[in-house]
Image (cartoon, rainbow, N blue to C red):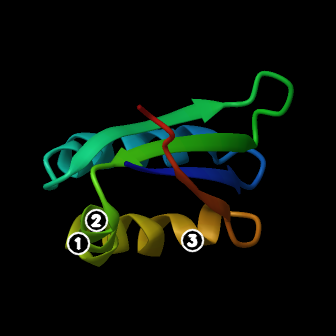
Amino acid sequence: MVVIAAVIRVNAGQGAEFEKEFLLLQPKVLRDPGAIAYAMHRCQDDPCKYFFYEKYADDAAVKYHTSTPHFKGFFQKMGPLMQGKPEISYYQEITK
């Protein structure tokens, strides 16, 4: 399993638009082959800060996800709302 954790900051006053677009994207991503979880969370202390949690079956599923038109379209629309680049970390799930 591959887990991706990302932190994205949006410009003040643009959180509602960012959340709206995410809610349109989420069901599409969850239909992608190998996608297990795709969730976004707003920071309680900073409404401009968002945490993404993503989980995929393997690296091939991640590669597929980042190649889809819906993923690319989301970042084209949301790029102007974001403060800088996302902070992204990749993790390998530890299981028995």
Distance from Cα at disc 2 to Cα at disc 1: 6 Å
Residue under label 2: 65
Q: Which mark is residue 79?
A: 3
Hey, what amino acid is under mark 1? Thr
> In front: 46, or 65?
65
Residue 68 picture location, percent across and down: 23, 72
2 or 3: mark nearer the eye: 2
Hey, what amino acid is under mark 2? His
> Dot 2 surroundings within 10 Å: few (below 14), some, or many (20 or more)?
many
Image height of 30 relative to 81, above or below:
above
> Quarter of the image holding residue 70?
bottom left
- Secondary element type, mark 3: helix
Q: Is 21 on the left or on the right of 32, as rendered?
A: right
Q: Are marks 2 and 1 in contact (CB under 8 Å)?
A: yes
> Quarter of the image holding residue 77?
bottom left
Image height of 10 relative to 74, above or below:
above
Residue 64 picture location, percent across and down: 23, 71
Hey, what amino acid is under mark 3? Gly
N-terminal of the pair, mark 2 or mark 3, is: 2
Q: Which residue shows up at 53% across the image and 48% down it?
A: 18
- Secondary element type, mark 1: loop
